[in-house]
Amino acid sequence: MQLLFASSNKNKIREVTQLLPEGFSLYGLQDIGIEEEIPEPGSTIKENSFLKANYVVEKLKKDGKKMVVFADDSGLEAEALDNAPGVYSARYAGVPKSDTANNEKLIKELSSQLNRKARFVTVITLISNGAICYFEGEVKGTISNTPRGNNGFGYDPLFVPEGYSKTFAEFTSEEKNAISHRGRAVQKLIEFLKSK
């Protein structure tokens, strides 16, 4: 089965590719010539996930093409910050997007907080033959005081999942995929597609 992942993020595409079983082929936006950044004006992670998937479906339709499309949107929610950065995770420190600047801002915002609890959330929107399905994944954890590790991306150097002492950036990609928010949402997506 051919799947189009409505993303240009090479890190995300690599993670999802590693999760797919045999018989699935994954394409990213650049593979089909979509270079522009897809607008994400939604007020929730779920809404942005849908907007991205729908944008690509509509663009394909105009070009007379049809594919099974899915998009994900993810966010980090820090309990002490009223669940910020949340839907604004990618641009927490402003534009242009910068993982380093986002992490620095998060450390600063939490510097006076004793509560370091947080969770990562992913919502995947699948659009296939006009039907829309959602798949959610989450992982709870805490925010480290300092970045650790060289793997992963985004807030991975700061996020320590529950039951572990290392950050996502200190995990191998296989270890992270097994328990991450995106990994959990993708597993639900795969189970759904296999049942069809």
Image (spheres, grey):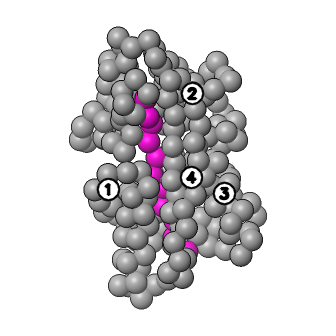
Give the spatial CA distance, label 4 vs label 3. 8 Å
Give the spatial CA distance, label 1 vs label 2. 25 Å
How packed mark 2 is, by other alpha carbons closer than 10 Å (few <14, some 14-19, many 20 or more), is some
Give the spatial CA distance, label 1 vs label 3. 23 Å
Vertical placement of residue 107 versus 178, above or below: above
Query: Which comes before the other along the chain, label 4 or label 2?
Result: 4
Query: Which comes before the other along the chain, label 1 or label 3?
Result: 1
Whether 66 is among the magenta residues is no
Tags 1 and 3 touching, CB below 8 Å: no
Q: Which residue is mark 3?
A: 188
**As rendered, which of 102 and 189 lies closer to the eye?**
189
Q: Residue furthest left?
A: 95
Q: Which residues are magenta?
A: 67-78
Query: Which comes before the other along the chain, label 1 or label 2?
Result: 1
Q: Residue at x 35, y 85 (%)?
A: 62
Quarter of the N terminus within the rendering: bottom right
Amino acid type for the residue under numbered disc 3: Lys
| Residue 7 relative to residue 82: left or right | right
Q: Which residue is mark 2?
A: 141
Q: Residue at x 63, y 26 (%)?
A: 162
Which dot marks residue 42? 1
Q: How many marks?
A: 4
| Residue 48 relative to residue 151: left or right | left
Please tell me in which quadrant of the rendered image residue 112 appears. Answer: top left
How packed mark 3 is, by other alpha carbons closer than 10 Å (few <14, some 14-19, many 20 or more), is some
Q: Residue furthest bottom?
A: 64
Which dot marks residue 136? 4
Tags 4 and 3 touching, CB below 8 Å: yes
Circle 3 — which element?
helix
